[in-house]
Amino acid sequence: MIRQLIEKIQATKAPICVGLDPMLNYIPEHVTKKAFDEFGETLEGAAEAIWQFNKEIVDHVYDLIPSVKPQIAMYEQFGIEGLKAYVKTVNYCQEKGLLVIGDAKRGDIGSTSAAYAVGHLGKVKVGSNTFSGFGTEFLTVNPYLGTDGVKPFVDVCREEDRGLFVLVKTSNPSSGEFQDKLIDGKPLYELVAQKVVEWGAESMDGTYSNVGAVVGATYPEMSRILRKLMPNTYFLVPGYGAQGGTAEDLKPCFNEDGLGAIVNSSRGIIAAYKTEAYARFGGEHFGEASRQAVIDMVADINRVL
C-alpha cells in the first residue's frame, strides 16, 4: 500500500494530502442553503451540505494530488447522518483514484482494537458474506496502549495490504506534556519511534513500511532526529500552513531522494476562499480557490526538496 502511495506522489509530483475536515462555517452559504432547503436545518441537512462541499473540492483537486485525509470527528459530530457523508466521501475519492487516509486516531486493546482495524481497514464477516466497513487505505492510530493496541492494526494491514500512520510527535502546542518527557534519558517520542520501526518491520513494502508515523511540521529539529531514527518509515506530516509550519520546516521530514513524507493541509485548502490570498474567487467558486491553493502548496514544498 505504501508503494501505491509513493507511485501516486511521484506521478503527481505532489507529496501532499488534502484534509477533508469540513465544519459548517467553512461551507459557503449557497451550499448550506440548498441542503437546508431540501432537508431542513437538521443533521441530515448538515450532512448533505458537507457531502456537496467535499464533492466540489474533490472535483477540483483530484487530478493534482495522490491522497486525501478526512478527519472522522468532523463527520461524527453529526451522528449517523455525518458518518453516511463520511462513507460517501471516502467512496467518491476512491472512485476518483485517490488514496484515503482515515484520520480516526483509533487505539484500544484486544478484540476492541481488532474490531476497529477490521471496521476501518479490513473486512467483516456477516454469515457467509464479507463486507468492507469504511474501507480506507490508511488509518491513523494512537499507540498509547502499546503493542496490544497496535498489533491488531498491523495484522490487518498485512492481511489486506493496508497502511497505518502511528502518532509519534504531533503538531499541537501541548504535545510535549507527554511526548517530550524523558524516560531513561530519551524523550518518549523517540521510544515510540523505535516501536514504530519494530512494528513496521513486519510489514515492509519495498524500501518503506506500510506502518508510517505522524510527525508534526511544527517541530523541525525533532523531525530531523526522527528521520534518522526511522529511515524506512513514511511520515504523515500535519501542521503546515494554518498551524504555522513552513516549507522549510518540512524539509527534515523528507529523505534525500525527496520521498519519505506526505504533508497534510486541511482548512488551508478547503477553506482557502475565506482567506485574503484567495478571496478573489469568492464563495461561489470555492472549489477553484481550493485548486489554486493546492497548486501553490505543491510549488512551495517542491521548492525546498
Image: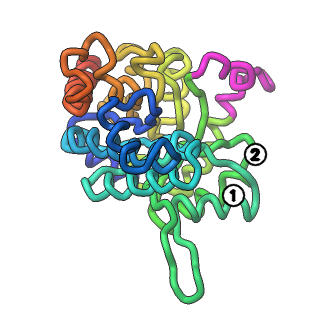
Query: Would you place residue 71 above or below residue 267 in this image?
Result: below
Return the mark for residue 113: 1
- The image quarter containing residue 285 is top left
Q: Position of residue 156 (x, y in %)?
A: 56, 64
SS type, badge 1: helix
Whether tag 1 and tag 2 are in contact, CB under 8 A, the answer is: yes
Q: Residue at x 20, y 25 (%)?
A: 292
Q: Is residue 175 magenta?
A: yes
Query: Would you place residue 248 above or below residue 259 in this image?
Result: above
Tell which circle, 1 or 2, labels the residue nearer the N-terminal end: 1
- Over which residues does the magenta segment extend? 172-191
Q: Position of residue 199 (x, y in %)?
A: 61, 50
The residue to which callout 2 is attached is 145
Return the mark for residue 269: none
Q: Position of residue 102 (x, y in %)?
A: 48, 48
Decide which of 158, 206 is in the foreground and name it. Answer: 158
Q: Residue at x 66, y 63 (%)?
A: 114
SS type, badge 2: loop
Query: Would you place residue 125 above or below residue 238 in this image?
Result: below
Decide which of 299, 226 is in the foreground and name it. Answer: 299
Q: Residues within 10 Å of mark 2 (few under 14, many from 20)?
A: few
Q: Is residue 214 left or right of residue 182?
A: left
- The image quarter containing residue 33 is top left
Q: Residue at x 45, y 46 (%)?
A: 40
- Callout 2, which amino acid? Leu
- Callout 1, which amino acid? Ser
Q: Is residue 34 left or right of residue 203?
A: left
